[in-house]
Each structure stands twice: as C-alpha cells, then as structure tokens.
Image: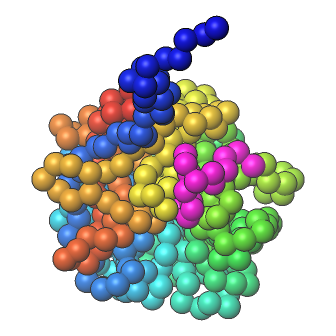
Amino acid sequence: MKRALPLALLLSACATATPAADVVPTVAATAETDPVDTAADAADDPAIWRNPRDPAKSLVIGTDKQAGIHVYDLKGKRLSFTPAARLNNVDLRDLGGRVIVAASDRADKTHGHVALFTLDTARATLLPLGRYPSGAGEAYGMCLWQRARDKALFAFVVMKDGRIDQVAIDLTAATPRVTTVRSMKLATQSEGCVADDRTGQLYVAEEDVGLWRFAADPAAPVTATPVAKVDGKTLVADAEGLALAPRGRDGGFLVVSSQGDSKYTLYRLPDVTFAGYFRINGGTIDGTSDTDGVELALGDFGRDYPAGLFVAQDGDNAPDTQNFKYVSWLAVLKALKLR
C-alpha cells in the first residue's frame, strides 16, 4: 500500500510543473525622430541610407502617409520634408552613388502607383522623379529588388487585397520608365515585403495569416511558399513590416513586426526558422507599440550603432504624434543571445 504524500509536497510538485511566464527581451531605443506633423495614424515606414564615407552622416527616410515623406539624421532630427499625398511604404537602393527611393502611392485607391525620388545625400533632400501606375487597387506595401546578375532594378507593389505587382524600373533615360512585368496573389490583406538581393527571394506578410516567399525574378513561377504562420505567440496578427539582416551567401535573419503584441520576431535564414523576439522599451526614450514599418541596415554607423541600425515606426508616441525609434542592431543580438 502506497502512502499518500503530504499536502506541502504535492503543492510543491504542482508549482514546479507550472511553466514559467514568457520573458520577452527588451532593447532600449538610442534615438527617436522628430514627431510627424500629422495627427492620428500617420507615420508608417522607414528606409535607411548608409553613408559609406562618413557613416555618422547616414540618413533615415520615413513616410507620413497623410502628408509626405521626411529625411532625418542619425540623431532623429528632421532635415527635410517633401509633400506628397498618401505615400505608404518606402525603400531605396544605392546604385553606385545615385540613390533611388521608391514609395507606394495610395492617392488613387482604385489604381496603385509607384512614386520615385532621387535622394540628394549632400543636401538630405528628395528630388521627385514622378509617379507611375502599377496596377488596379490600393497600393499598400513596397520593396525594391536589384537583380544580382545584371543590376536590373524592380519594385514590388503590394496591394491591399493581397495582389503583388512587380514593376521593372528603367533609369537609363532622363525620365524613368516603369513597366509592370507580372503579378502574384495572396488571399487576404497584405502589406509588408522585403526582397533579398543575394538570393532572389521575396518575402511578403499576409497580415492575419503569416509570411510567404516568392522567387523574385519576373521569369519565375508565381507560386507562393508559406514560411511562417501567425500563431498567436511567435507572431501575432497583424504581421506588418519586414527587414533583412543578411549574412554570407544566404544566411542572416528576417525581422518581422509582430504588431498584435508589439514585438519584433526574428527568423534565421535561409530556412526561416524561429530565432527569438524582442520589444523596444526601457532607457530614457519611450518604447514602441503597434509598429507598422521596420527597416534594418548592417554596417558601422558610428559609436551608437557599431554593427547596424534598426528603425521601427512607433504607433503610439503620446503625448506627441507618431515617430520612428532607432535601435542598435548589436544590442538586439546581445539581448537575444544570437550570433
């Protein structure tokens, strides 16, 4: 006959079996941009230009989807503003000294457009090159891809209904030529995207479903491959902005804004396996919440960002209007104990 365990031992055993609460690493923001001038939901998506000759003079671009597009310095000070109606997501590529900036243009909700600019890096201003139609629908997401073999430049315009229009951008003439070369489709509302110039892979966030991968080349099949699910824990709807931290030929990390719980989730490339998550909080600058767009650029940006700069939109910057927060990528890797 077995003897009953004392009540104290039973309670102790139950306590040991209870799983510990999830502890989310936090990383403090190092700087924040001046708030946008527009109230309510306005700041949306950032892009980063790293100055290879003087990293401290690198620039951050951020959209105000109600009013236009800003250029900031590494302290977060606004250096210039270009009025434009309903620009949403933004991306850029440095084409051997000429920096091209592209944004999704939602001014016409029935037909998406691409707005093109040249970034004057010396004056920290954007010079408009025009707006060009991509396809029917409301343009939400935007990312650029430069093909490795011939340096051809493409943009992906993610429509609100989940269609993705790929456009070729020809800059050889005085006026850009923008041509839609193919379309792909996800089932529901989508926005965030990022393309890997090394591997020719496009990643797109379907907000309530998860992440998908496409081959970026316009001659490739339009089949989508699911790579990560919105599961309510590692990734919480809405899945929003995407960014890359490339390493080697195909390694590194894919970073996603897990908007539903104000986290940033990392997946290890090339297999897109979960690597951890973090929040922006602590320090003398307030944290972030409800983040839409994110961007990441690796390299030395100076003392505060020795390994790279991560920028995230802050959906609640009360009592001020929305803005963007800057974070050291090295601090993220340390917080998540990643290499």
Eyeballing the image, is 99 above or below 298?
Answer: below
Q: Is residue 252 left or right of residue 182?
A: left
Which residue lies most toward the top here? 1
Q: Is residue 84 left or right of residue 210?
A: left
The reply to whether the magenta stretch includes residue 41 is no
Eyeballing the image, is 139 above or below 173?
Answer: below
Q: Give the residue displayed 64% in from the left and 38% down from the top.
A: 272
The reply to whether the magenta stretch includes residue 230 is yes
Q: Nearer the viewer, residue 46 or 200?
A: 46
Quadrant location, the N terminus = top right
Q: Nearer the viewer, residue 222 or 155?
A: 222
Q: Which residues are magenta?
A: 226-242
Which residue lies most toward the front here? 1
Relative image position of residue 233 (x, y in whole percent): 55, 48
Quadrant location, the C terminus = top left
Q: Give the residue displayed 60% in from the left and 45% down from the top.
A: 196
Residue 131 figure quarter: bottom right
Relative image position of residue 139 (x, y in whole percent): 61, 78
Relative image position of residue 251 (x, y in whole percent): 58, 30
